[in-house]
Image (spheres, rainbow, N blue to C red):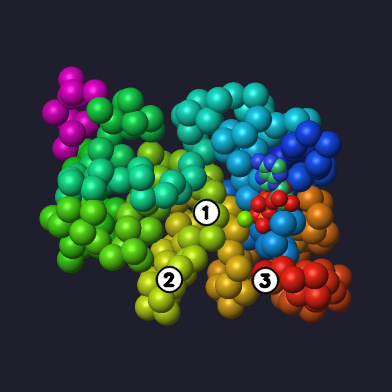
Amino acid sequence: MSAPILQATGVVKRYGKFTAVAGVSLAIEANTVHSVIGPNGAGKTTLFHVLTGTVPITEGSIRIDGEEIAHLPDYLRVAKGLARSFQVTSLFPNLSVRENLRLAAQGRAPREALRFWRSPESLVAAGDKAQALLARLNLGAVAERPAGALSHGQQRRLEIGMAIGADPKVIFLDEPTSGMGIDDIGEMKQLIHGLRSACAVVLIEHNMDIVMDISDMITVMQLGQVLVQGTPQAIRSDERVRRAYLGSMITGGAA
Ligand SMILES: Nc1ncnc2c1ncn2[C@@H]1O[C@H](COP(=O)(O)OP(=O)(O)O)[C@@H](O)[C@H]1O
Ligand SMILES: [Mg+2]
């Protein structure tokens, strides 16, 4: 197996005396969907925040393509090829879907995308890329509509399009299907699975059907640590995983 595109080692995140992430190591291979699951409160979202630079790391190492990024601010991690899907606030609601994607395709950082002196060649390239993204996102039919007028499911797909417009090496998705109806869930599942051809996907997802169907690798977290890691087949039949979820149900977790 080739060197992982993202290698986190011994990641710790403490809030005061409370340890939310207690020494997690994670290797993400290129062009795979790697899911992170576990009961509510296991530390999944905190791990994502630490890896993407939303909150500072307490201890540990994060390497992308071998390069240490654990102490870089979030926007510099984006420049190194790390993307996450933001909430609707990252969309320009009054611009068309196509214009949103064109802006995202123009540069890795928003600052870059808004440079007005870009060469005509790169503007054409961004237009072509926006067109390709429209197809990938299945948003071709609503390309000229303002982003703010899209349905919830369409907006969530567009957010992912904005994130991959910058050609990331790894994209982080935290519960991308939350609050979605069945049709939108199906579309999202297809989109995420297809992203593997472009980058590695690290996915937090509560819907186990999706996780089992599209993951190449699954890491199960519990109490801030990695409980077990394996293929969907191995995780499905793992007694420790079953017990972790049972335990969370007894104590009231909804995962
Ligand atoms: N900013 C914070 N300050 C203190 N504790 C936090 C903070 N963020 C998360 N936690 C705690 O860290 C634990 C893990 O939370 P989280 O990462 O959201 O879990 P998950 O995403 O797996 O449900 C929880 O006990 C949560 O209350
Ligand atoms: Mg969470």
- Please say if 159 is above or below 114: below
Of 86 and 19, which appears nearest the observer? 19
Q: Residues within 10 Å of mark 1 (few under 14, many from 20)?
A: many
Question: What percent of the width, then of the height, locates residue 33?
Answer: 57, 59
Magenta extent: 115-124
Name the spot of residue 214 as percent of width and height, x first: 56, 69
Which amino acid does the dot numbered 1 rest on? Leu
Above or below 141: residue 122: above
Q: Image point 52% across, 38% down: which residue?
A: 82
Mark found first going from the N terminus, 3 or 2:
2
Q: Are marks 3 and 2 in contact (CB under 8 Å)?
A: no
Give the quadrant of residue 14: top right
Residue 254 is labelled as 3
Mark 1 and mark 2 in contact? Answer it, CB < 8 Å: no
Residue 44 seen:
no
Which percent across, then down, holds residue 58? 75, 30
Q: Amino acid at mark 3?
A: Ala
In front of the other: 233 or 188: 188
The circle drawn on residue 19 is none
Q: Quadrant of the C terminus?
A: bottom right
The residue that label 2 is drawn on is 180
- Residue furthest top as drawn: 117
Looking at the image, is mark 1 or mark 3 earlier in the sequence? Answer: 1
Task: Judge the density around disc 3: few (<14), some (14-19), many (≥20) Cα neighbours within 10 Å.
Answer: few
Q: Nearer the viewer, mark 3 or mark 2?
A: 3
- Say which quarter of the image contains residue 65: top right
Name the residue: 72% across, 57% down: 41
